[in-house]
Amino acid sequence: MSLVASELTCIKRDRVLFERLSMSLEPGQLVYLRGPNGAGKTSLLRILTGLAAPDAGTVYFQGAPVSNDIAAYHKALIYLGHKPALNSTLSAMENLRFWLAQQYLTFDPKAAYQALEKLGLVGLEDIPVRLLSAGQQRRAALARLWLKPASVWLLDEPFTALDTQGIALLETLFAHHVADGGMLLTTSHQPLSKRAGPVTNMDLEYRL
Amino acid sequence: MSPLFDGVFKRDMAIAFRQKSELVQPIMFLLMVVTLFPLGVGPSPDTLQRIGPGVIWIAAILSSLMGMERLFRDDFQDGSLEQVMLSPVPLWQVVAVKVLGHWLVSFIPLLLLSPLLAVFLNLTFGMYQALIVTLILGTPLLSFVGAIAVGLTVGLQRGGLLLALLLIPVFIPLLIFATSAVDSAALQLPYQPQIAIIGAMLLLSVAASPFAIAYALRVSQN
């Protein structure tokens, strides 16, 4: 029950971002991926999700390469990238409904409403996402973490545009997820506070 | 919950009907292009009848290119496409449903409008019959083949014109067989062979293009 990356290499435009990088993410572990801009944090996350292919190396989930049964891996995964993945003409509620349907999950309006309530989006759930502020859009995207039961969370800069109260909420959620035996890999430019629980740091260097 | 119907088809329909202007503009463009021809080449009924089928088909291809980008552009830019790729549903099924939805909203209006265009261009009833059959079989082909090029160019900034340059040569065979079918109908000759060839092209594209589109999108994500 773990996510293991073995000997990953990623080359972008003739620059080696990382070479023979191995890491593992165990249940109940929060890995905090650090590194300067351009170090390859996003590239590593995208390789771990299966969105991008590494130039060398393999990603294993529960002992088998993820490409063997990518659907089973994606069932257990939530990835939130830089882009909020919300259609700007649809409302937050509609975005969540269609996203859940794509994940083979039933849409429970009550659960979705409760998640949006926790995130302070009550009263805004039915207006088009483009009318929300950047922080509110980020909150609407994060509502997915409450709605899909998934063991692996890969989050790319989840705190971007959030206010202090939003950050505290998210860190508390991280602690719960990890305490329940979930796996979490997150990048961020600001240090995690104690609320997030025990953290394993991992550093990526900027290589020339 | 059916992920393809509830998660993809209904979503695309909801988005399409919120952005009505994007739906109406290509159809208005088509109508105007067709109207330009009588003004440009003269309103003689014989001339219009001779060039009519070609005019309607060229206008249909050009207007389809305008709306084609809409297929994946927004989903690529806002990150929804990433989430679709990370869902347990196979990507080729998702893109097949998306292309089908795109065909429904962009070409059904054209099919509904086609009797009017036939009257504009003085087509006989026999010619119109042939035209509507070529449109019913040919426009899904435009959507399926066009989606491959959209998948390839979606990662580029301003890929719009490149899309047209890639696709117009690919649509030449379709244009030849479609207008030739209508010409045969004008001469009261059988036009089943041309229809059969268009049908064969459609079947091939329906069978193969979802995989090509899925692959193109994966390449664009990389």
Image (cartoon, coloured by chain):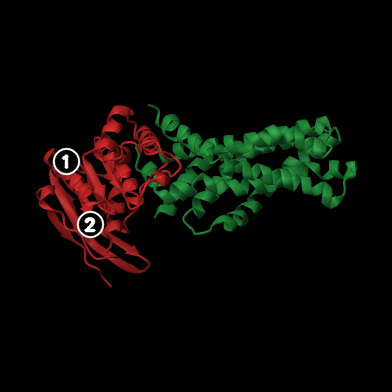
Chain colours: A red, B green
Q: Position of residue B80 (x, y in %)?
A: 40, 45
Q: Which residue is mark 1?
A: A177
Name above or below for residue B46 compared with residue B2.
Answer: below
Residue B60 left/right relative to A146: right
Figure quadrant of residue A112: top left
Name above or below for residue B207 compared with residue A36.
Answer: above
Q: Position of residue A166 (x, y in %)?
A: 23, 47
Q: Which label sits on residue B22?
A: none
Q: Which label sits on residue A188?
A: 2
Q: Position of residue A6 (x, y in %)?
A: 21, 54
The residue closer to the viewer here, B59 or B145, is: B59
**What residue is shown at x 63% (from left), y 50% (from top)?**
B170
- The amino acid marked with disc number 2 is Ser
Q: Are marks 2 and 1 in contact (CB under 8 Å)?
A: no
Classed neighbour count for the residue bearing mark 1: other residues with Cα under 10 Å, few (<14), some (14–19), many (≥20): many
- Looking at this view, name the residue that lies furthest to the front: A123
Q: CA distance from mark 2 to mark 1?
A: 18 Å
Q: Chain of mark 1?
A: A
